[in-house]
Amino acid sequence: MKRYLLALFVWTLGSATVFAADVNPASVPEIPFDSVPDFLKLPVGMYMGEASGVAVNSKKHIFVFSRGNSTGPAYGATAAQVLEFGPDGKYIREIGHNLYAWSFAHTVRVDKDDNLWAVDKGSDMIVKFSPDGLVKMVFGRKKEASDEAGPWTRVNPPRPHVDGQFRQPTDVTWDPEGNIFISDGYINSRVAKYDKNGDWVKSWGERGKEPGQFNLPHSIAADAKGNIYVADRDNSRIQVFDNNGTFLRIIKIDVPAPPDARVWMGNAFTAKNPPQTSRIPGSPWDVCITPGPGTQYLYSSDNYPGRVYKLTLDGKVVGMLGSTGRQPKQFGWIHQMACPSENELYVAEILNWRVQKLLLHPGNSSR
């Protein structure tokens, strides 16, 4: 029976006092779970690269954004491929083969109408596909090859934001009205908002540590009320806003790593070799929210010690599962999750080149 202490954090922004979580400091239950063995089945001779994104539509089809289909040389190679699988895990098709936007896969999502959205960090583009696989909307623009294109660099002070231009975007979500929210991302450190027709509305955020500022907004999700949850990864927190960008609260997952926690690669973390901010226990790499109506839950994954956390929408950690490793039920850098229901998760792992289907059994949780 393992126990981990949780801390309670409070922030103040203007006249609003924001509480991160109402938690029981005694323990966080570990949720028993299973991983379906070899769930996704690729054709003979076809391989998955780093699985950076996963999404599930209303028909239970699974979409994986893989850093496969690579061509050399290593720098500047195309590493992006959307693969579709049926509910039984059997391969169906590739969507957008050799698409102009493909460069370096980041995340993939499905909206309420089963449209597929792919976010490519390398090309700075977000593409909306119809359920039939037709390109319906394009956001952002990649650099022209004729201009000796290279990756965006981080400079200080940061470059000014440009409406409609993205610099290594990371994710996309929607509110109930169909407004589009894009986390933008590694360079711009902001959230961009479009209306349902694809017209620019506004953006909010900049690089920093204060509430409403970001240090790598790496993932984004919306609840049934239209509140926007941003995984502010390198600030080790989840920030919550309304759909106009008004700051509401901060969620901190402060569950220490167990003494026997491992890293997937690199030197073990010690007092003399502490983890960088993106690898502090609880730092959110991805967030997903279970669908309504009814009670919704927020799931968040971290890099180290390689866990998935289950939270209420107000930030209470109600359970956790997993650890770092290469075996089933272990994780190698979960980059994106899909949570079509409270007890069914799909996790895309970069380092293990796979997607696991997880079945949770919270009724058997122990403390």
Image (spheres, rainbow, N blue to C red):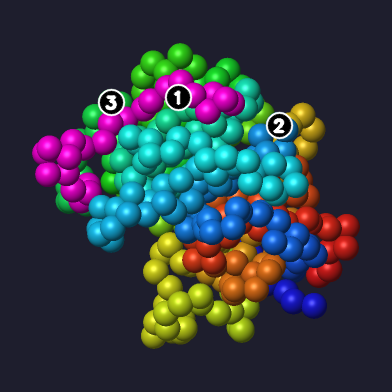
Earlier residue among tags 3 and 1: 1
Q: Is residue 4 above or below residue 172?
A: below
Q: Nearer the viewer, residue 223 or 69?
A: 69
Q: Is mark 2 on a helix, strand or loop?
A: loop
The answer to whether residue 324 is magenta is no
Q: Say which residue appears at 41% left-offset and 57% top-offset.
A: 234
CB-based contact (under 8 Å), mark 2 and mark 3? no
Give x and y (percent) for residue 25.
Answer: 70, 65
Q: Nearer the viewer, residue 40 or 93?
A: 93
Quadrant location, the N terminus: bottom right
Q: What element carries label 1?
A: strand
Category of crowding for the residue at label 1, using alpha-carbon neighbours closer than 10 angstroms: few (below 14), some (14–19), many (at least 20): some
Give x and y (percent) for residue 221.
Answer: 56, 38
CB-based contact (under 8 Å), mark 1 and mark 2? no
Q: Which of 233 and 149 is in front in this view?
A: 149
| In the image: residue 333, left or right of residue 79 | right
Q: Say which residue appears at 50% left-offset and 46% top-offset.
A: 65
Camera-nearest label, 3 or 1: 1
What residue would you read off at disc 2? 58
Category of crowding for the residue at label 2, using alpha-carbon neighbours closer than 10 angstroms: few (below 14), some (14–19), many (at least 20): few
Q: What element carries label 3?
A: loop
Q: Say which residue appears at 78% left-offset and 63% top-offset.
A: 34
Query: Which quadrant of the structure image shows residue 364?
Result: bottom right
Q: Residue 135 carries which label?
A: 1
Question: Is residue 55 visible to us here?
Answer: no
**Disc 1 marks which amino acid?**
Val
The magenta stretch is: 130-153
In the rendered image, the residue lying farthest to the left is 147
Give x and y (percent) for residue 203.
Answer: 36, 28
| In the image: residue 85, left or right of residue 216 | right
What is the C-alpha distance between the residues marked 3 and 1? 22 Å
